[in-house]
């Protein structure tokens, strides 16, 4: 009988640990989402226009040098 009770107790502990792990993982995901939203804060400096590398990639990928995309 003692083995059965110990086994059940261990099973309950495992389930509780799994639930706690899920809570921690979801909390970490919420923290990451919050950090992303804070990074997109309107008070943060905003870059205007594409970077040089992005502009070069667009102009080489667009027929006519990308002039049609920028009006």
Image: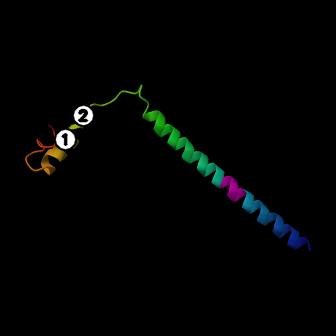
- The verdict on residue 22 being magenta is no
x and y percentages locating residue 10 in the rendered image? 79, 64
Q: Dots 1 and 2: beta carbons under 8 Å?
A: yes
x and y percentages locating residue 17 in the rendered image? 71, 57
**Residue shown at 24% from the left, 37% from the top:** 50
Residue that mark 2 sits on: 49
| Magenta residue span | 17-21
Q: Is 52 on the left-hand or right-hand side of 68?
A: right
* Residue furthest front as drawn: 71
Location of residue 39 by image quarter: top left
Most common SS among magenta residues: helix
Query: Which element type, helix, strand or loop, lies under badge 1?
Result: helix
Residues packed near mark 2 inside 10 Å, few (<14), some (14 to 19) or many (20 plus): few
**Residue shown at 68% from the left, 59% from the top:** 18
The disc at residue 20 is none
Q: Earlier in the sequence, mark 1 or mark 2?
A: 2
**Residue shown at 77% from the left, 66% from the top:** 11
Residue that mark 1 sits on: 55
**Residue shown at 18% from the left, 46% from the top:** 58
| Residue 37 versus residue 28 in the image, above or below | above
Question: What is the distance, in whole Å, between disc 1 and disc 2 at their CAs?
Answer: 9 Å
* Residue furthest right as drawn: 1
Q: Quick one: quadrant of the N terminus?
A: bottom right
Q: Quick one: quadrant of the C terminus?
A: top left
């Amino acid at each position: 009988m003692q083995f059965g009770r110990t086994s059940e107790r261990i099973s309950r502990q495992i389930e509780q640990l799994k639930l706690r792990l899920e809570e921690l993982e979801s909390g970490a995901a919420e923290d990451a989402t919050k950090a992303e939203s804070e990074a997109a804060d309107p008070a943060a400096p905003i870059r205007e226009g594409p970077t040089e590398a992005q502009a070069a990639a667009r102009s080489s990928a667009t027929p006519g040098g990308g002039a049609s995309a920028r009006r």
